[in-house]
Image: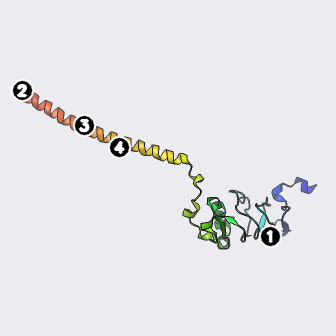
Amino acid sequence: SLLFHMTQTEVCPPSCNCKSLGEMKGWHIDCSSRKLTEVPALPVNTKRLYLQNNSLTLVPPGALDHLRSLEEVKMFDNPWNCDCHILYLKLWLEDISAPSLANIRCATPAPMRMKTLRQLTGNELGICKRLLPIKCLEFFWRDLILIAGAVITLILVAWALKFSKKLVCQINLSRYNSR
């Protein structure tokens, strides 16, 4: 009945081996070599997390944010798909366990194969065009046209002012001469 009252994130994931590190000290969660294709729901007080040697390709953004007491994480030997969606995992690991970035290698896409997460540049991660929706480009062209229109209008106003001064001077001169 105690288990019934616990939420999923306080229970050992069924696909993993869990050891308590003692009362209030957290969990050692071993999910290595389980053919996992996604990261399971993990207890909040996970201290050590082993996810190596699985079939993980990505970690959904925010999926690991609740693991605030994590001290050790291993995620190598997974077929990581290193498109722009790997950015969450890269940034999360930079905060939690920067050394492990050197052990995590990309499997796909082809140009990234065998590169480590540490080697990936923002330029390489920008290959998902969906992150920059077409609408952004439409706004860009609309703004460019508006700016060009404003510049042309300013030039025309300046030219008109200059021309009108000449005209006023000529009118004044002709009045002065006719006296």
Q: Residue at x 74, y 66 (%)?
A: 70
User: For mark 1, does the 10 Å Cα neighbourhood hold few (<14), some (14 to 19), or many (20 or more) residues?
Assistant: some
User: For mark 3, does the 10 Å Cα neighbourhood hold few (<14), some (14 to 19), or many (20 or more) residues?
Assistant: few
Q: CA distance from mark 3 to mark 2?
A: 26 Å
Between disc 4 and disc 3, the foreground one is 4
Q: Residue at x 86, y 61 (%)?
A: 14
- Disc number for residue 161: 3
Quarter of the image holding residue 2?
bottom right
Q: CA distance from mark 4 to mark 1?
A: 63 Å
**Residue placed furthest toward the front:** 110
Q: Considering the numbered disc 1 on the image, is that residue within a helix, a strand or a loop?
A: loop
Q: Nearer the viewer, residue 65 or 87?
A: 87
Q: CA distance from mark 1 to mark 3?
A: 78 Å
- Disc number for residue 178: 2
Q: CA distance from mark 4 to mark 2?
A: 41 Å
Identify residue for label 1. 33
Instruction: Please provide percent x and percent y for residue 56.
Output: 73, 64
Q: Nearer the viewer, residue 39 or 92?
A: 39
Height in image: 109 above or below 177? Answer: below
Q: Residue at x 50, y 45 (%)?
A: 138
Identify residue for label 4. 151
